[in-house]
Amino acid sequence: MTTAESASESSQAGKFDLGALLAERGAERYELHNRYLNPQLPRMLHTIGFDKVYERAEGAHFWDAEGNDHLDMLAGFGVMGLGRHHPVVRKALHDVLDLSLADLTRFDCQPLPGLLAERLLVHSPHLDRVFFGNSGTEAVEGALKFARYATGRPRVLYCDHAFHGLTTGALSVNGEPGFRDGFAPLLPDTAVPLGDLDALERELRKGDVAALIVEPIQGKGVHEAPPGYLRAAQDLLHRHKALLIADEVQTGLGRTGDFYAYQHEEGVEPDLVCVAKALSGGYVPVGATLGKEWIFRKVFSSMDRVLVHSASFGANAQAMAAGLAVLSVMEDEQIVAHVRRVGDLLRTRLAALTDRYELLADVRGRGLMIGIEFGRPRSLKLRSRWAMLQAARKGLFAQMVVVPLLQRHRILTQVSGDHLEVIKLIPPLIVDEGDVDRFVDAFTAVMDDAHEGGLIWDFGRTLVKQAVANR
């Protein structure tokens, strides 16, 4: 770079100072959201006391404006697989910006997309090609389109309570009515119960099914496909000339203790696989649809169809660099084996509490995707309080646990879905034994309070009033 070019770049950069902007306007964050974005988000955060101001983050922790450390057991809904600001991913992004690549010309073939596809396919050797988009819902949209075109059939089956995204195609295979209401007409897709092979076969006999899309472990409620189901479903689908689509947007890239969750079951080889979230490194949105050679050859069958499915920002250099760095870290730091070990420890310690607490009904999941379910207690005093919450709105008790975990113990978690008494733990894959100790100790303290009739129930009454007011 010449002196003149350097001076010009410095002059241009000087016109915008992001740090100064945040210093000047950062305190307006909740007001800005309320005025210009979704107004229900700040309202909800204020109601449950989640209206924190977080200043910085690293790994599995972030710090609020007072300098207090918080443990992240949510990972940005699974996006922060390697935690926040992993140094290898940060360096890759600095590098790709400094290289000033001729990116997104659209009429050349840059090396980074091919390199990332090559690395991804190593982990699913029965698949052959990759399409890169910008998100999990785009990865799902691509799989739905590819399955319909490749089979020449219009209908896709999905499972009750599934979540595959919120764009129109993905919404058509969303098993939660609350997300679908008011957005009809959707595509003519059909729900079947997770694990019900008879229901699957009844639909396949109609001859118009292109595919079944399934999460090996459903994010909503953390329900795992029954043992043997994926393999049997795959065999049924292929017998009826339909495809199996594995949605690994949340479960993929090590989350469940294998690179992909479908790999827990021997012989399962989906025709299409959707990934996103953790592939981003927490920085640059990216989604990928992996598939078999014959499917891609059919969709992109001639030069006339070269752009029949594309994405303006798909395969951009920053996203590809982040993805390559993520896969490198996963290999170098043996992330999958770490997840298996720490996940087993966390799940075992939580499951041991089910005999201690009558409000704790079940602990389930794989790796670092764990569901904690609450249920109707035995004792009369607790049953009356439980009934009060259930009458107002199902899911309030789980919210009663999530709130003190954050407010008293500075641990961020989430309720696993609307009207569910389930907390879902999907922390960064790098959490360690010290983080497990911290969470279990905090969870035990909150459950002790709940069983002793402590302050948690005062907050419960506040939630009941709010639930009644919103009816």
Image (spheres, helix red, strand yellow):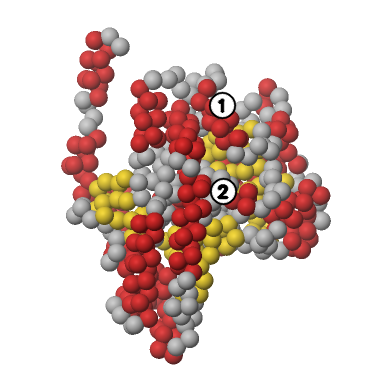
Residue 148, x across and y down, in percent: 70, 43
Q: Is residue 458 left or right of residue 350?
A: left
Mark 2 or mark 1, which is nearer to you?
2
Question: Given the image, on which type of amino acid does mark 1 rest?
Answer: Gly
- Quarter of the picture containing the N terminus is top left
Residue 112, x across and y down, in percent: 50, 26
Residue 19, x across and y down, in percent: 22, 37
Distance in Å between CA atoms under marks 2 and 1? 24 Å
Q: Is residue 99 left or right of residue 193?
A: left
6, above or below 198, in the image = above
Question: Given the image, on which type of amino acid does mark 2 rest?
Answer: Asp
- Mark 1 lies on residue: 114
Count of numbered labels shown in the rendering: 2
104, above or below 127, in the image = above
Q: Which secondary structure lies at badge 2? A: loop
Whichever of callouts 2 and 1 sits on the residue coming sooner in the sequence is 1
- Asked if residue 274 shows in the view, the reply is yes
- Mark 2 lies on residue: 258
Q: Which secondary structure lies at badge 1? A: helix
